[in-house]
Image: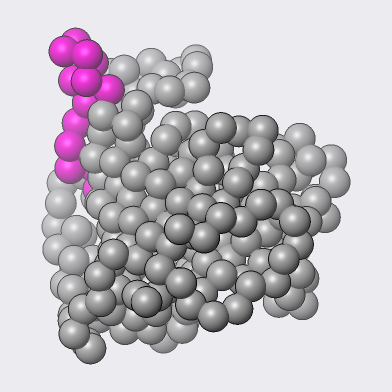
Amino acid sequence: MLSVDCQRIKLSGPRSSVRIDTSPSPLPIEVIVTAKLPPGAGKWFVDNALAQQEKHPEYIDEYNEPSALIGRTTFEHSDPTAVYTFGVDKRDLVFHRHQGHRIITGITGGKGCLLKFSLCTPEDARENPRKFLENLYIVTIPGDRQFVLRFSGTVYHQFCPADKGENAFFAVSTHTNEAWGLTGEVLQTVLANNGTIALLTEPAPPEALELAADQESLKQAVYIDLDIE
């Protein structure tokens, strides 16, 4: 697995996995491409899965992230795990962060996806939004691929289609401790088993969101192309 620290190193050429250091946080960002599907299989799967997800009774669509809770927590039996499905369609997710650890297994559509991560702190994002671009990584995954992402959701992240004309990916997301880091009313809602992905979402400040959408500014990012070797 390729390891990348926070230095501004321009990377080229595909590799199947990457590990991005997020010091001082002990949890790195890890992305692994695990399989290559027959051409067209990813598009068929993602289109079908997004349509099926809309029928789920727990379906919601907020922050451009259609999702559904498919596995509830059982805190009373010492199991804080929650399981969601979610999709990235032809829209960019809103750049955001949230409490908790995530393990995501996804399949890309016909044209693939972009996984963007900014190591900017919430304090810097509010006080000096340009820092949002100083440690920005963009991982690209081609179409018709299965991948796994493991990371701390406290890192600002945004998932996008590689081509706005194609759905990006569909995934199952495991929240290993749904209550981790939560306080107040949000914690009480989660403990009552009424959590949603949207409830836990904290969008980046408006100024940072504006910078992150500027194509010229995105040229500062480290681009990492992943694929099956």
* Residue 91 shown left or right of residue 23 in the figure: left
* Residue 115 coordinates in the image, percent (x, y): 50, 63
Quadrant of the image occupied by residue 117: bottom right
Q: Residue at x 46, y 83 (%)?
A: 163
Q: Residue at x 26, y 33 (%)?
A: 82
Q: Nearer the viewer, residue 7 or 138?
A: 7
Image height of 186 relative to 14, above or below: above
State the extent of the magenta-drawn residues as a range: 64-80
* Residue 67 coordinates in the image, percent (x, y): 30, 52
Q: Quadrant of the C terminus?
A: bottom left
Q: Is residue 78 magenta?
A: yes
Q: Is residue 203 visible?
A: no
* Residue 211 shown left or right of residue 31 in the figure: right
Q: Quadrant of the N terminus?
A: bottom left
Q: Is residue 19 magenta?
A: no
Q: Nearer the viewer, residue 133 or 47?
A: 133
* Residue 191 shown left or right of residue 129 in the figure: left
